[in-house]
Image (cartoon, grey):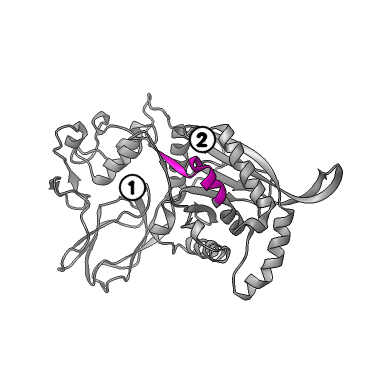
């Protein structure tokens, strides 16, 4: 049996082999840990698809592997892994490489280009035709790097690309470390986000004095249940009425079909600081969860990504993103979109400061909210109305249900 690197997350086309948990000749059981793979989302542990003896490991630690590439061969056994190539796509196998497919659809010129299903998906995501790309693969196939170079997201320094790589000269004593793993993937993902989505940021302030009081009144009861109650749990719960009122913020843009896709689910990504970089686990179905369930899920997911134990399905399919830097400080930030989401909300530090209420100066707990949006889908007026609606909910927190 040949085991291929599976699809390990939304928009992920490759992963870096961090650590092999087996050796050639080892006998393992189905679902035993096989390998740790680092993507732009997190480091995930991939289990063995079957019991058996490891005959050959095709990649070494540190290698970057495309989805659908054969990574392990088992002795004997029956192949269980599902093939992602459609029946109409004849497969031309290549030892140690992903299967390359040609599709004979008459009306699709790109179908006659040799490329893996993962590369085809990448080209589709980046809205580039395979027929316009110069192939550099060993079998004259188009690779993921070829696609990235075609839109200026690769590492090539050829002139004429949209993004030309800049070499930094060495001056005096310097320490250099490779840009790789999650950090490299984050750099690529954010560059793609800024390139495709015209960003703008709208900032508003909110009086969270009543929210501070409400949280204090709930904390002890939650602690007795073993639940850490953060402001973030209230934020996620409070978002739902505003997202329902302004559905353009809970959407994405399908660039291939030129359609705005409104999400009928509310899966909120929570940007989480980890030693490897910023990872975005997703709290699914926030509208259907209680405050206690949301609080538990936020903590569980944060612990999972920091321990590199998050499951692939916990890192994809967000419809909206929240990033919180309140525990660190600062007034407000201008976050970059978690593409393809069209909105990301930054929650900032709560400050006690004097404000005017009913003609009098009083001390209140104040916080800035900053929301960055994709201007192709959301206009400034809509952003302002959304934040106004959200602010009213936060300032009357007892209405959060």
Q: How many numbered discs?
A: 2
Most foreground residue, 348 or 71: 348
Which numbered disc, 1 or 2, marks the residue that appears first in the sequence? 1
- Report whether residue 370 is seen: no
| Disc 1 versus disc 2: nearer the observer | 2
Mark 1, secondary structure of its residue:
loop
* x then y, percent, for residue 18: 38, 58
Q: CA distance from mark 1 to mark 2?
A: 28 Å
Residue on which disc 2 sits = 378
Are dots 1 and 2 in contact, CB under 8 Å?
no
Circle 1 residues within 10 Å: few <14, some 14–19, many ≥20: many
Which quarter of the picture shows residue 1? bottom left
Per the picture, the main secondary structure of the magenta-coloured stretch is: helix
- Report whether residue 298 is seen: yes
The stretch in magenta equals 241-253
Q: Is residue 386 left or right of residue 366?
A: left
Residue at image position (62%, 57%) is 400
Residue at image position (52%, 63%) is 297
Rendered-image quadrant of the C terminus: bottom right
User: Is residue 100 on the magenta stretch?
Assistant: no
Mark 2, secondary structure of its residue:
loop
User: Is residue 242 on the magenta stretch?
Assistant: yes
Most foreground residue, 197 or 327: 197
Q: Which mark is residue 166?
A: none
* x then y, percent, for residue 35: 34, 63
Q: Is residue 211 left or right of residue 272?
A: right
Residue 187 vs 168, above or below: the answer is below
Residue on which disc 1 sits = 13
* x then y, percent, for residue 354: 82, 46
Q: Is residue 257 left or right of residue 214?
A: left
């Amino acid at each position: 049996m040949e085991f291929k690197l599976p699809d390990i997350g939304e928009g992920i086309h490759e992963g870096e082999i961090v650590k092999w948990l087996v050796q050639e000749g080892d006998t393992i059981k189905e679902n035993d840990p096989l390998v740790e793979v680092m993507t732009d989302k997190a480091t995930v542990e991939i289990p063995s698809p079957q019991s058996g003896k490891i005959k050959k490991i095709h990649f070494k630690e540190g290698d970057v592997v495309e989805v659908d590439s054969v990574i392990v061969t088992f002795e004997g056994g029956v192949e269980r892994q599902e093939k992602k190539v459609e029946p109409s796509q004849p497969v031309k196998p290549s030892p140690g490489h992903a299967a390359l497919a040609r599709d004979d659809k008459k009306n699709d010129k790109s179908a006659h280009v040799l490329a893996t299903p993962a590369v085809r998906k990448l080209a589709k995501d980046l809205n580039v035709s395979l027929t316009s790309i110069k192939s550099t693969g060993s079998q004259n196939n188009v690779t993921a790097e070829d696609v990235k170079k075609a839109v200026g997201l690769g590492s090539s320094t050829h002139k004429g690309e949209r993004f030309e790589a800049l070499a930094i000269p060495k001056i005096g004593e310097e320490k250099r470390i490779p840009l790789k793993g999650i950090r490299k993937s984050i750099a690529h993902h954010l560059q793609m986000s800024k390139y495709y989505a015209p960003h703008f940021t709208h900032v508003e302030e909110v009086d969270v004095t009543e929210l501070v009081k409400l949280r204090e009144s709930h904390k002890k009861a939650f602690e007795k249940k073993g639940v850490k109650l953060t402001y973030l749990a209230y934020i996620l719960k409070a978002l739902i009425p505003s997202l329902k009122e302004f559905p353009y913020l809970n959407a994405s843009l399908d660039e291939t079909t030129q359609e705005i896709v409104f999400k009928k689910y509310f899966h909120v990504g929570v940007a989480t600081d980890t030693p490897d970089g910023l990872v975005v686990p997703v709290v699914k179905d926030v509208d259907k969860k209680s405050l206690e369930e949301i609080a538990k899920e936020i903590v569980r997911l944060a612990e999972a990504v920091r321990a590199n134990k998050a499951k692939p399905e916990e890192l994809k399919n967000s419809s909206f993103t929240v990033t919180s830097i309140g525990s660190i400080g600062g007034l407000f930030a201008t976050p970059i979109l978690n593409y393809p989401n069209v909105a990301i909300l930054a929650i900032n530090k709560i400050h006690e400061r004097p404000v005017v209420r009913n003609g009098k100066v009083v001390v209140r707990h104040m916080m800035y909210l900053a929301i960055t949006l994709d201007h192709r889908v959301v206009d400034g007026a809509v952003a302002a109305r959304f934040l106004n609606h959200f602010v009213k909910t936060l300032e009357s927190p007892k209405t959060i249900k």
